[in-house]
Image: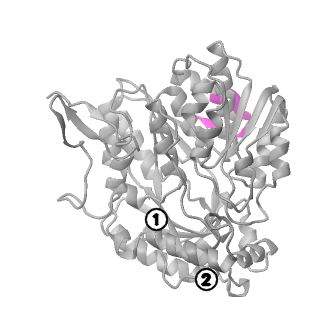
Amino acid sequence: MVEAPFEPHPDGKPGRVVSERGTVGPGRGTRTGITADGAGPAGERVVTSGSTARVLVAAAARALRGVDCADLSHPPTLARFPGAPEAVRRAAVARTVGRVALSVDQAAEVDAERVARWFVDQYPRRRYPGAVLGSAHGAAVHLAVALGVPWLPAGFEMTVRWTDGAVDHPRAAREHGANLAGRLQRGNADVHVRQVHCPASRGALAGETVTLAVRWQRLPCAYARFLAARLEPDAPVLLLRDARTWPVRDDGGGHSFQVGCPASGLDPVDFHADSPALRQVIRSAGGDCSHWDPPDVSSARALAENGVEAGFELGAREWTGRRGHPLHRVVFPQPEVLSAATADLYRGWLRSAGKTGDRLVVECGRLLDPWQVVRAGLVPYWCENAARRGVSAAEWWLAGSEPFTSVDVLPEPPGVPSPAWAGLPQWLAVAAFGRRRRALDRTAARGYPVTSVPTRRATEVLRNQPYDLPVPPPLAVDAALAALRANGTAQGLLVG
């Protein structure tokens, strides 16, 4: 049987199968509405708008098509209403989130396999010399683009409405989330649901919705089919794992709960009621820290929400072993370790193609555009968010690196106040490492840290960089692994 060519949707939505006679229907693995083999909301509706995995898949798929991220906007946050009083802003966002977040009944109808199909359907249907799977990380996507391969996450984020919720009641959040997880898992036995209640990173939204990190405990069938159809013979697969840990309450049953998260920039001890940082965070979110009474933890060092389930890795290892594809594991103890190693890899890759490798862009959160980075011949360094410790890591890396002639900085405003965020002077200090050009995006800086800017802002900035064509030929996987070992081993990066 000859496979029909595939036409990807320009917005990254499920594509269409195209024959010589034209469009003949939905592509293999896509579904619209409720179908016989599953029901519930489509993947585009399920995965949280603006979540890291969603943005990174969209950016990677566009880069592999030679398209930038000019059409990517941003999710609703408190920063979308900068001129209104705090109470009015919270009420407006609550109404907006109520329309965007899933209802309790919709969450119970989610089909995780359908979400996996939505992810793979965003990629062009052609043969690839490999694939990158695992934890959501901007540098992982830059690595995948340099290799010319797709990136697929080991899980996804859902946001579900919490009627009568309160930002300062983590026990009530856990009870609501456990009920949601139980209903979700009746139709999705092969997922683990990690609930994250973090006012420090989500502000007042933590009292309007619950955040569920859904992690596959096996390789999804959609991923296996995609890899079987799209990988070249003997093509390697890279599995990237975030090794950060966090205190967790896990009573079994496939649902676990954590208060706070590493991406907040705070430590677990900061989420106790007597913490000055927590009091500041709760007060700014409209809560009262005297109500704060989180449940006891059952594991002090469980993998945090961005980790990869052991069953997912085992499934990937078994699948690649049966198919004859080498599997390589890359484990990073902190996000900045992979960011630094990938930036050094890019510099070497660009220079091997005759380019200078002396122009750096420091991206942050959703502010990235892998295609524009490659088009302009830039070295990318990705900060997970605006946390002070992550920005400090970028400074330390720059201090120990060969100087760059230009440094462009794209600081994504977190949208909520917190003592853990870096101030603009620290971002300016990062830009100051440029010998000739030192640029901090003024749009992102305007109203920082409580404003918000869309992903496409990174595209707008990077489009102004001069072209540096042609694009280097794709990096070989063996060369990439060697570069990651050379550049990251001393900082704790494990490459196997």
Image quarter of residue 493: top right
**Secondary structure found at label 1:** strand
Above-or-below relation of 181 to 359 = below
Asked whether, in this view, residue 16 is left or right of residue 71, the answer is: left
Kindly identify the residue that appears in the image at 36 percent across and 33 percent down. 124
**Crowd rating for badge 1 (residues with CA inside 10 Å; few <14, some 14–19, many 20+):** many
Kindly identify the residue that appears in the image at 57 percent across and 21 percent down. 479
Q: Give the residue at mark 2.
A: 169
Image quarter of residue 78: bottom right
Decide whether residue 264 is among the magenta residues.
no
Q: Give the residue at mark 1.
A: 193
Point out residue 19 in the picture as x, y percentages from the top left corner.
18, 31
Above-or-below relation of 302 to 117 = below
> Could you tell me the amino acid type at mark 2?
His
Q: Nearer the viewer, residue 149 or 325?
A: 149
Q: Nearer the viewer, residue 249 or 39?
A: 39
Kindly identify the residue that appears in the image at 35 percent across and 36 percent down. 227
Image quarter of residue 471: top right
Point out residue 23 in the picture as x, y percentages from the top left corner.
20, 38
> Could you tell me the amino acid type at mark 1?
Val
Decide whether residue 487 is among the magenta residues.
yes
